[in-house]
Amino acid sequence: GAGVSQSPRYKVAKRGQDVALRCDPISGHVSLFWYQQALGQGPEFLTYFQNEAQLDKSGLPSDRFFAERPEGSVSTLKIQRTQQEDSAVYLCASSLLVGQNSYEQYFGPGTRLTVT
Amino acid sequence: GQNIDQPTEMTATEGAIVQINCTYQTSGFNGLFWYQQHAGEAPTFLSYNVLDGLEEKGRFSSFLSRSKGYSYLLLKELQMKDSASYLCAVRDRGGSYIPTFGRGTSLIVHP
């Protein structure tokens, strides 16, 4: 079946613009994660959903970042008033369920955001 | 949270064996993952260790010592396509069982 998809794959925004990044997880996957990956770094956790509930948003760097998953499937990460330091690849991942007895995350190809 | 350390870059020769180390500090260890990430692509799952010892999967093996806070990924019979970043990620019982990733080790395989 289809893997995790993300759109757009590339986004160039002028500083101060708002952007919305979309993630379509694997069908039936309960858990959904957003990560931010800077060049040469590992993915940094942003936020986590279980179905439509946002259970952890401790990684969101500021109140300009907002994520939602209203129907428990597709998720959108919104960044308001983008700044140059927001330039990064934004990765979405899904898994059947997060917990002690499940583990593998399936990642999407990412959205490369460049703020000019 | 977790403190994860792995080398930034390694080089190796096609056909050889390479070992990529990962050390971590965590208060409630609940599993360690290795992912492979080719440039410009998504990370893909390689292995998961939660108990001490060696897990072998084809050309790739992963080892864990919980008492030492140490893991390694062993790649045998290296191929050019193994050139990629290798990410170590540790899961903690605290919080939401969400893995924390290290910065990754960039492996360059040359002929």
Image: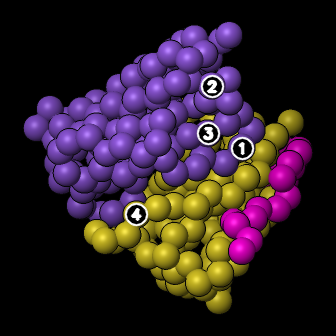
User: Which residue, given by chain and number where applicable, does mark 2 sit on?
Assistant: B79
Among the chains pictured, the one given yellow colouring is A
Q: Is residue A67 above or below residue B74?
A: below
User: Which residue, given by chain and number where applicable, does mark 4 sit on?
Assistant: A103
Q: Do labels 1 and 3 share a chain?
A: yes
Q: What stretch is highlighted in magenta?
A: A1-18
Q: Is residue B106 above or below residue B32?
A: above
* Label ID, residue B41: 1
Dot 3 falls on a residue whose secondary structure is: strand
Marks 1 and 3, how far apart in space?
6 Å
Dot 1 alpha-carbon crowd within 10 angstroms: few under 14, some 14 to 19, many 20 or more? some
Q: Nearer the viewer, mark 1 or mark 2?
A: 2
Of the residues shown, which amino acid type is indicated by label 3? Answer: Gln
* Label ID, residue B37: 3
Q: Which of marks 4 and 2 is in front?
A: 2
Q: Residue at x 86, y 49 (%)?
A: A11
Q: Does the magenta stretch include residue A12?
A: yes
Marks 1 and 2, how far apart in space?
18 Å
Of the residues shown, which amino acid type is indicated by label 4? Answer: Tyr
* Residue B88 placement: quadrant: top left
Q: In this view, does B4 lie to the left or right of B67?
A: right
Mark closer to the chain start, 1 or 2: 1
Q: Which residue is drawn at 69% across and 66% down?
A: A4
